[in-house]
Image (tube, grey):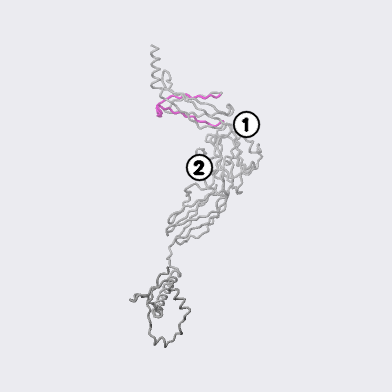
Amino acid sequence: MFVVFLIFLFFFHTSVLAHYSATITNDGPVVLGANITFQAKVFKNDVPQEGTFKFKWRDNMKIQNKFEETRQGHSTWKINHSAKKYDHGNYEVQVGVYIDSDIFDWSLCYASASFTLEDHLVGELILQQDNQKVGTYINSKKDLQQVVQLHGPDFEYLSKSAYNYDIKWWIDSQPFNSSKDLHGLMWHHKYQDANVSHTIGVSIVAIRNESNSNSSEQPSTEVDFIDSTNSPVNTKFDNATDHSFKEKSSYSTFSNITNSDACKRTQVCGSFSRRITVKAPVENVNIIGNNWLKHGDMLNLRVTCNGSAPFQFCVRFYVGTYKVKGNETCKYPPAYYAHCDFSVPHYFRESKSYTVLLIVRNDVHTNITAVGVNIYEVTKHPQLSVVVVPLTASILAIILIIFGVAFYFQNRNSLAIEVADFDFTNNNELEYKTFKERLAEAIHNAFNKPEDFSEEDSYNEAPSTSNKKYGSMQ
């Protein structure tokens, strides 16, 4: 019978209970002495469960801590690990989830998680300009708000415990400001030396006031809760004042705060630092060029400015009037330039009004300038030479033609050509002579010259005709 009961329990656990699971979260790491909170949630097939379960907690500290409660769906365990009893390091917490029963507890599932206890305050140093977080590069024209943003449990521990505070701010390991209350977690300073790097540090030493450690009275300092999950930081300290560095501290340099003997069991220490580089913003932007252009002319602007390199530059064009919003960005990632001297050539195809948006930025500032450009049409008049030269040439051509025609009619009689009549169609046939006969006749005529010709002889003497026929010279 007992074996049957065990088999039933096995199948019940396999078919029903095996689908349960649990998860553990915590808000660590925390400094020794601060509360750390663990939370467990129950799931079935990855669906959160709202039923009533029994949760059994325990950790693996040298002096083990245990906690047990019955709640619906989830369990929360808040525990404090005193620096007098525990050492800093990594530890593990475990929770078991059970179904509460009058006979015995049915185990549903187990879960475990690691957590960390620190020997120094947990947080970070936040830098802000114009209520916006900044990184490595700082604007030299604006105040820098430096805030120590402690982790929630650590800040709660400091603010609700009986401690005397010694908070100091350092620049390049030199003390600049000191405070005796938690208002000193915020400090304003202006870094004006452009293109210079600095190391900002803040040291916090909270010394337990033994005379008030058993008193229920809380410290008089009232500071808003600083949660590291908030972004950006909106913490405000009313009537916060800077305290001059008057007292001699038990530590002389920023680097030996957490490692020095000053941090005893009766103290809570912490230090935070950031490396910054001061840069001059983009300013004195000068734009040279004509923004009233005839249609067909090229826009040619020159942009110069002052500030710390490197610079990025881009141009955007809009039709009509454009109102700058301040959050405009470049369409494509621009290149980096060592000098702020840029040219903007552009051709506009249509006669309209345009807005040229010039975006110049460096590591700490962005300057956006809008330039209106107007393209206008001009009535094109033909040049004088284009009209005069063809007209003059046409008139001269007409005059030359007229004079040529007149000259022709005036002189055409004197240009008559006298035509010789070579009509040899006479009925009388010429006497045929061979070449030898013609040669002999020519020689004869050469030696027997006729008498001188006289007009009278020519007039009275009748012409004689001789029919001679010449033969071939062959």
**10 Å neighbourhood of mark 1: few (<14), some, or many (≥20)?**
few
Examine the rendering and report whether any part of residue 111 can be seen: yes
Q: Which residues are magenta?
A: 32-61
Give the labeled residue for mark 1.
264
At 44% from the left and 28% from the top, the residue drawn is 41
Q: Position of residue 464 (x, y in %)?
A: 38, 82
Q: In this rendering, which labeled residue sits more in front, label 2 or label 1?
A: 2
Q: Which mark is residue 232?
A: 2
Instruction: Using the image as rendered, state which of residue 201 and residue 319 is in the foreground.
Output: 319
Check the image and name the residue furthest to the left: 427
Residue 58: in magenta span: yes
Left/right placement of residue 421 relative to residue 362 reads left
Vertical order, 366 against 12 (above or below): below
Name the kind of residue labelled 1 in the image: Lys
Mark 1 residue element: loop
Horizontal placement of 141 versus 14: left or right? right
Predominant SS of the magenta segment: strand
Toward the viewer: 214 or 31? 31
Percent x, y of residue 72: 41, 28
Q: Secondary structure at mark 2?
A: loop
